[in-house]
Amino acid sequence: MSESGQAIFDRRIESEQKVEPKDWMPADYRKNLIRQMSQHAHSEVIGMQPEGNWISRAPTLKRKMVLLAKVQDEGGHGLYLYSATETLNATRDEMNEALHSGKAKYASIFNYPALSWADVGAIGWLVDGAAIVNQISLQSTSYGPYSRAMIRICKEESFHQRQGYEMMIVLANGTKEQKAMAQDALNRIWWPSLMMFGPHDSDSAHSGRSMQWKIKRRTNDELRQSFVDQTVPQIEFLGLEMPDPEIKWNEERGHYDFGEIDWDEFKRVISGDGPCNRDRIRHHKKAHDDGQWVRDALVAYQTKKSAASAA
Ligand code: BYC
């Protein structure tokens, strides 16, 4: 008797083999992957907006070129992730519709404004830094196309993180005003960066199943702690004040302690009521509508080509 799809799937997960698009998979595994991967793709694309706003105001040509390349990379990450999600039979139209209707979320951090040039540095350093901590663990996610997208994305993201930190080094060692800008950016972006890892494990709706299926390899709280542990020495190196008075090395735990996130704010932002939620979606819808002529032209060209080859 041949083995059931479920048994083959279970064995694959158990033995760390990847699940590939044509393999049998439980319906809930597919659904959960579509949810997480499409939200990840949306985060990359919506994440282009806060930094994109600064391209025309970058202080030098070199900074402008670097920022332009970084924002373009984020668009590319979105495309890898949308393509990877399409292998699960989700269409781009469905994913877009879910984003525009508010059914699909995207990383809460992008609902905060980038108020100063120092925010661009802090986003690269902290937001890309937080993203990498998570994405390194997702390189070994059980779904093949997601894992392979993560390997490539991490390489680019680590360049983004370093360019952001280099900007912070320059500002923190610049004039009094520049140092104050760097401190202000750190103070504002710190907490939303910690929120990127999601609710506490005890409140996380999806972690249990996702860890079992090896979609997620480390829990929200584990990842958040790794991020804090790696970032505190970087704050010290910059000579900036800690953004949270409760940050303190805990000898017994071998980790830094830190204060409690404002979970009411987190819930407000993920349910659509953050400082920039409406603007972000309005802008995305407009860009999508403005690009309709490109999609129409592609279809018209394809139709013409097929008609010519049939003739
Ligand atoms: N923001 O059960 P939980 C980048 C939602 S972009 C918004 O713990 P899960 C970059 C969660 O979706 C890289 N929503 O969820 C780009 C769920 O709601 P639904 C972004 C959040 O999935 C441009 C509910 O809360 N990285 O690098 O097990 C410039 C319950 O949560 C958030 C990724 O997207 C949040 N922060 O764990 C610069 C990583 N947290 O879906 C940089 C991929 C939670 O039931 N995603 N929610 O309506 C993941 O790893 C996981 O989805 C999470 C959450 C760890 C985020």
Image: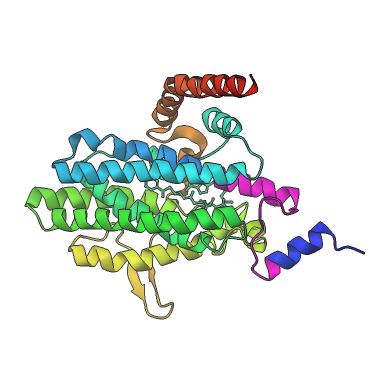
Q: Residue at x 37, y 54 (%)?
A: 156
**Residue projecting furthest to the left:** 175
Where are the magenta residues, as a range? 13-40
In the picture, measured across the screen, residue 211 lies left or right of residue 129, that is right
Q: Where residue 125 sits: x, y (%)?
A: 30, 55
Q: Nearer the viewer, residue 238 or 188?
A: 238
- State the image coordinates of residue 245 (x, y, percent, origin top left): 29, 61
Compared with residue 286, is residue 66 higher up or lower down, i.e. above or below? below
Q: Residue at x 18, y 35 (%)?
A: 57
- Visible in this render: residue 260? no
Q: Residue at x 42, y 37 (%)?
A: 46
Which is nearer the eye, 290 or 218? 290
In which quadrant is the C terminus drawn?
Answer: top right
Which residue shows up at 62% across the image and 53% down it?
A: 206
Quarter location, residue 155:
bottom left
The residue most toward the bottom is 252
- Membership of 152 in magenta stretch: no
**Residue 248 shown left or right of residue 14 in the figure:** left
On the image, the x and y values in percent for residue 2 come to 88, 63
Drawn side of residue 127 relative to residue 91, left or right: left
The answer to whether residue 38 is magenta is yes
Q: Tell me, yes or no, if residue 6 can be seen here.
A: yes
- Against 60, is 303 above or below? above
Q: Where does the image place residue 146, in percent across and percent down from the top left?
A: 56, 53
The residue at the far front in this view is 311
Q: Quadrant of the N terminus?
A: bottom right
Q: How is the image coloured?
A: rainbow
